[in-house]
Image (tube, rainbow, N blue to C red):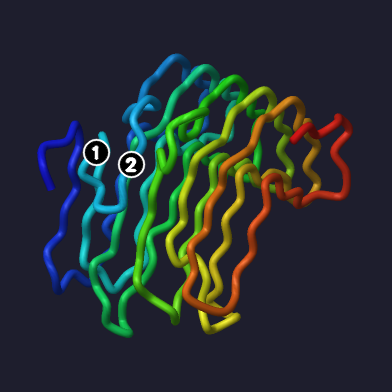
Amino acid sequence: FPSHDIQWTASSGQTSAQNFTAISVGGTGNASISGNVIGNTTPGTNEDGSTASIVSSIYNTSASSVSGISITTIGTVACEYNQIGSIYAINNDISTSARPITFNGISKSASAGTTTIRYNTIGSPTAAHSIYFKNFMTDFGQSMNGISCVGASSSFDVSYNTVANLTDFNSRSTNSTNAGYFYGITAGGSSTTGTINGNLVHSLITINFAGQGTMAGIFQIMERIPSQTKW
């Protein structure tokens, strides 16, 4: 690869997970995550990653991940006006032992707390393939989330975000047990209340070789959402 703003590489023969997270907020306290730029939302990412701002190029036999913002605190969090884009990730391992790379633009996974995720941009409104994840496996599916806000006994507001121009190359699997998924926005959980409103999700592309997998612009995993969802 030519020079990039951030480049994460691992040589062949790696057996431990190769994870990259730009911003991680854990513990039990409250937090405000606002106005950050992770990568770039202007240029697209081509098939070899040469134009990407952030590159993860690995050979790996353990499931790995690339995350823009990871929220695990059980406190009250406002995550607003952040931009995440121009990211390319590839697992170059073509063996049957290879495992996928999971992408989360913004991820909240604590089983408690109040989380507001608003006015963020994941990908790019206009640049094609702003976030491009690639693998060559068929036994294990690759998974992508633009925004994931899940966790039991929590509350959330996911509104007025843009998730656009994400490309998932080979997200599916020949094995339904190990199938991948591709969600623009996923939110909810048991005993969870929340709002999903006014989000713009478009230009999600999956390029698959075979078999199994799930794709949705907005995926709800709760009994009800009291506010309207706009696609």
Residue 87 vertical placement versus 133 (above, below): above
Task: State the residue at coordinates (54%, 48%).
Answer: 145
Tell me what residue is drawn at x 46 percent, y 50 percent. Answer: 167
Mark 1 residue crowding within 10 angstroms, few (<14) / some (14–19) / many (20+): many
Q: Does 105 sit left or right of 64 as displayed?
A: right
Residue 134 pos. (x, y %): 36, 60
Amino acid type, mark 1: Thr
User: For mark 1, what is the residue?
Assistant: 51
Figure quadrant of residue 102: bottom left
Taking the image as shown, residue 5 lies to the left or right of residue 206, namely left
Mark 2 residue type = Thr
Q: Which residue is mark 2?
A: 45
Give above or below for 113 relative to 88.
Answer: above
Which one is nearer the viewer's eye here, 93 or 79? 93
Residue 20 location (% of width, % of height): 30, 46
Q: Is residue 151 above or below residue 158?
A: below
Give the x, y percent position of residue 43: 34, 30
Q: Secondary structure at mark 1?
A: loop
